Structure formats: C-alpha cells, structure tokens
Image (cartoon, rainbow, N blue to C red):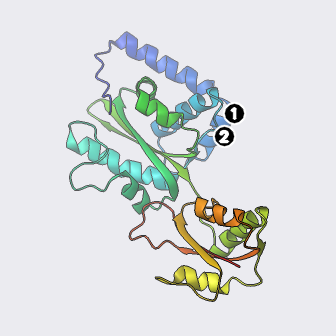
Amino acid sequence: MFLKVNCLCTMQIKLRTRELFLVLLTTLTTAALSSVMHAQAGASPAEQALLQLTNRTRVAHNLPPLHWDSDLANAARAHAQRVVREHGELLHQYSGEPDLTARGAQSGAHFTTIAENIGSGPDPVQIHQTWMSTPSHRSNILDPNLNAAGIAVVADQGLLYAVEDLSHSVAIQSFDSLEKQVAQTLQAHGIAPAASNADARQTCSMPSGAAGTPKLVVQWDGPDPTLLPDALLRAIATGGYTSAQVGVCATKQPNPQFTTYNVAVLLY
C-alpha cells in the first residue's frame, strides 16, 4: 500500500538530489506556479514543493493542476503527526483514529471524492519520485477527477514524513441555487418548471410521503443534484409528464462524510 523510502544515500547522492530539487523548482509551468501561489497560508516550503511537483506532473500529462485546500491540509497535518508518533508502518488509519473520509469531513473540507498518499524520504523530490513509481500513488496523482490537494510534511529523525490528501472538492451552494440548476437540467429534457417549488421543498424535508398531488415523486441523495437518476430519466422518456417542482435540502443520511444533498422532484 505504501513504500517507505529507506535510502542509505551518500553525501554526493544527497547533494545531487538537492540540485535536482532546485532545478525542478525553477522549471515549473506557469499553471503549477499559479496554484502554488494560493498555498502560502500556513504551508511550509516542503509542502509547497510537493504541491509544485504534483502539479508539474499533472500538467505534463495534460491534466489541470490541483488547487490548495487548507481544510484538507489540516486533515493531512493531523494524520502526519500521528504517523510520526507511531514510529512504525505508514498507515491510512491507526487505532482509534477516524478513517480518511471522516478526517477530511471533520476538518471542514467539502468533497465528493477523497484519496491519500503517504510517504517518507530525505526530501520532497524523493517522496514524489517514490509515489510516481508505485501504481496506487501514481493513480491518485494523475486522477483526472481530482481538483484539490492539502499536504502536510513533518520532519523526524532526519526524514520527512508526508501526507498528501487529494479530493474532488465542491463549492457549497444554496439550496435555491441548486434547485434552479436541477430545473434547468429538467428543462433540457423537455420538462418545464412548475410555478412553485413549495410542495417539492416540503416533500424533501419530510421523513416519508409527499406533499400535494404529483403524478410521480422521484427522490434521491447525491453529491451533484444535477445528475438525474436513471429512474427519473426513464419516467421522463415515457412522455407522460410536462412539468416538475424541485426541492433540494440536506441529506437524510446519518453522519454524512461526503458533501451530499437530498433532492425531490415532483412530476406533473
């Protein structure tokens, strides 16, 4: 799952590594440099360097750079400190510690996907090179669905221990704004918006049942309310409905860790 870098490097090899590190820092693309400019708040030089290296690699593979997420960085920092305290195998979860999704959510990050790389080495270049040489870490770095990163680096006994939390972050939007987006998506499928969303909003917040007298109610939980479920698309395809009310509210899932909404669509 991880590779711990245990390198008995000579002084010459270490100097060459540092020289490579400096060259990399001076040859970053404009896009990667731009992303690092947003990483200044609380990020150490080693943490910024890992973000630069990650973004340089993504840009080289025609992927957009990741933006810095301070909440993810806080989650990564707490775990990195735990990694150092354990003095053993590098793990994503230690005894009594929340799992990755819970750690991310508890730090205040909002996301629909989350991943994590952990490693150790003498400097950021070695850590990044090790991640890129192992399929699981490389896959996380080059995942086109991810758009944010928070990184923590802790020094201990001559090594750097790094935790890189990656996610597909989502902006928190008002329910009203999301309802309008769902209505626009439905309109693109030939379903006109109803004059009012009052019954749909009431239905969304009800533990069961529906308000009003719709022909059909389709209700679901999801991170992106505009992604209509197959059941709703099949109903629309029958041609039996012409308009819809839309209600978006907080998810009904207990203790949600991912950013999720509950959506109620009432068809008429």
Q: Amino acid at mark 1?
A: Thr
Horizontally, residue 31 falls left or right of residue 169, namely right
* Residue at (57% x, 27% y) in the render: 25
Q: Which residue is mark 2?
A: 34
* Residue at (21% x, 51% y) in the render: 95
* Residue at (58% x, 57% y) in the render: 170
Q: Are marks 2 and 1 in contact (CB under 8 Å)?
A: yes
Residue 105 appears in the picture as rendered = yes
Taking the view exactly as shown, the residue that stands out farthest to the bottom is 212
Indicate whether 169 appears above or below 236.
above
Rendering coords of residue 60 (x, y %): 63, 26
Local secondary structure at mark 1: helix
Rendering coords of residue 145 (x, y %): 57, 43
Quadrant including the C terminus: bottom right
- The quadrant in which residue 155 appears is top left
- The quadrant in which residue 188 appears is bottom right
Local secondary structure at mark 2: helix
Indicate whether 5 appears above or below 148.
above
Indicate whether 255 appears above or below 64.
below
Q: Amino acid at mark 2?
A: Ser
Count residues near mark 2 (Cα–Cα under 10 Å), then give few for <14, some for 14-19, many for 20+.
some
Q: Which residue is mark 1?
A: 30
Rendering coords of residue 86 (x, y %): 21, 43
Q: CA distance from mark 2 to mark 1?
A: 6 Å
Q: Determine which of the numbered discs, if any, sits on residue 188 in the image.
A: none
Indicate whether 132 appears above or below 180.
above
- The quadrant in which residue 245 appears is bottom right
Rendering coords of residue 53 (x, y %): 53, 30
* Residue at (75% x, 80% y) in the render: 194
